[in-house]
Structure formats: structure tokens, C-alpha cells
Amino acid sequence: MSRTPYIAGNWKMFKTIAEAEVFVSGLLPRLGDVDGVDVALCVPYTALGAVVDSTRGSRVEVYAQNMHWAAEGAYTGEVSAAMLNELDVHGALLGHSERRELFGETDRALQQKVPAALEAGLAPMLCVGETEEEREAGDTERKLRHQVQEGLEKVPVERLAEVTIAYEPIWAIGTGQVATPEQAQEAIAFVRALVAGFDREAAERVRVLYGGSVKAENAAELLALPDVDGALVGGASLDPASFAAIVDAARG
């Protein structure tokens, strides 16, 4: 089954509204009509409205970097799906390793967030991945099994394929280290097999991305792997030219 390549940029805590608008004005001409590739930008809450407006009419989607599972409530500092919908946001990045490690995000919370996003009409992008210690201990598959099974536990089977999964080996995020093609393919094929444990057809349709020090220089090799459907790009997504080059690599 043919899956449309997906390139998503995660800006993390970078870019003011003014900087975000400059970025978009530099990116869109470089993308052209983005034929054959889906593109998303995961931007800080404060810049969401401006980036949605700046990309309107293009094929670039806009994601929040987090979302609470509750419709509303006494959750100071959190943002709900309804608040994101009001801005015409397309989806939400959920469970990024920095959210897990620095802010205590749990698999149990993600078990609620992923279906809540779907129910609200937002596309969820679920991040999974192992630490360097876990890989060295041979625990990669155990960690991925737990994260994927917990994160998808409450997703209706007929909607599984609407979830995008981003495999990010934590040891490769922002370090300059990149998983070898063999490591990336093996881990992402395992993630797809875990989805098949829920539903075989969904596993063929779900898109699994690689993330972790993806750059224009290494993107083509990673994107050519049979189970890799795209990339979640960190630092290289902060520059319009480098991000556009990765999108070009996904066009093949």
C-alpha cells in the first residue's frame, strides 16, 4: 500500500510570532505546490494563530506541540483541543521525549490524549523511542512495545491509521548522532508490527516517521527505507532552506 511521505518540523521553544512569520514567508516559495509530500510545522502555542494564517491556502499543516486530554477544567498552564480547534490547528504532537523526560509526561496520559485528539478532529502524532541506556541493555523492543500499546490502547480500531507515529531514538535527538539505516528500519518495522497487533490493515496504512538529527544531508538515505514514511525534524526545521531540502528529499 502506498503511503504519502510526511515531513514534520518541530520548532520546540524557538521562534517568536515575528520570527515565525519570516520563516513561513521564506519557506512557502521553496516548497512550491508540495506535490506528493505532506508537510507540517509543530510550533509554540503563541505562534500557532500567526502560522495558521500565514500558511492558509498552502498544503502546510500546523500542529501544536502538546494538548491536554480534558475538554476543560482546572489545569493551569494547559491547552485543550477546543482551544486548538478555534485556531484552525490541524493536529498535536504528543509524547515527545522532551515532554516525557523534562515534564513528566506518562504513557497513561498519552493513552487519554491520543483518542481525545482524534475525537476533537485533530490529527495526533505520537512520539516513541528509547534512551541510549535502554538500547545498550537490549530493551529497545520492550520500551517501544509499552509506549505504542499504551498510546494506542483506547484508539478505535477503525481510526488507528489516522495516528502518525514518530520513532525518535532519544540518544539521537539534538546530539548529531543518527540511527544507522539498519537501526531505523528495524525499529520502525517493529513499531508497524505492534500496530498490526491491533489491526493488520491499519498497520499497512499508518505512517511511521523517523526523528533524531535528521538533516538535508542524511534525509534521502533514511527516507528510502521501506518502512520509513517521513521524518520529524528538529534543529534543521528552524531554517527554511534546510527544511525545504528535506521535503525535496521526500519527493524522491
Image (spheres, grey):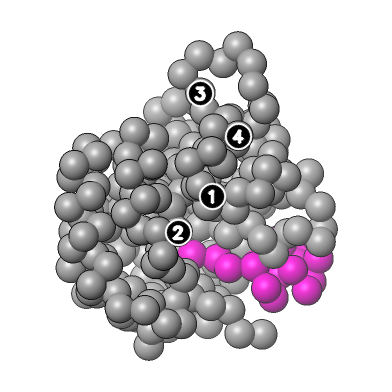
Query: In the rendering, at what x and y percent does residue 134 appear?
Result: 48, 46
Where on the picture, by quarter, is residue 107?
top right
Q: Residue 18 sits in which quadrant? A: top left
- Residue 228 in the image: above or below residue 166: below
Q: Position of residue 190 (x, y in %)?
A: 62, 66
Q: Amino acid at mark 4?
A: Ala
Marks 1/2 in contact by CB < 8 Å: the verdict is yes
Check residue 111 for magenta coloring: no
Magenta extent = 192-209
Mark 3–mark 4 distance (CA, rounded to whole Å): 12 Å
Mark 1 lies on residue:
91
On screen, 119 above or below 194?
A: above
* 3D distance between C-alphas at marks 1 and 4: 12 Å
* Residue occupied by mark 2: 61
Q: Relative to the observer, which residue lies in front, 89 or 74?
A: 89
Q: Does dot 2 land on a helix, a strand or a loop? A: strand
How many marks on residues? 4
Q: Which residue is mark 4?
A: 82
Can residue 203 be seen in this snapshot? yes
Type of amino acid at the residue the image marks with label 3: Glu
Judged from the image, the secondary structure of the residue bearing numbered disc 3 is loop
Residue under label 3, please give it.
78
Element marked by disc 4: helix
**Residue at left offset 46%, top offset 18%:** 77
- Camera-side residue: 225 or 124? 124
For this view, does 105 lie left or right of residue 195? left
Estimate the spatial distance between the alpha carbons at disc 4 and disc 2, rounded to whole Å.
17 Å
Identify which amino acid the numbered label 2 is placed on.
Glu
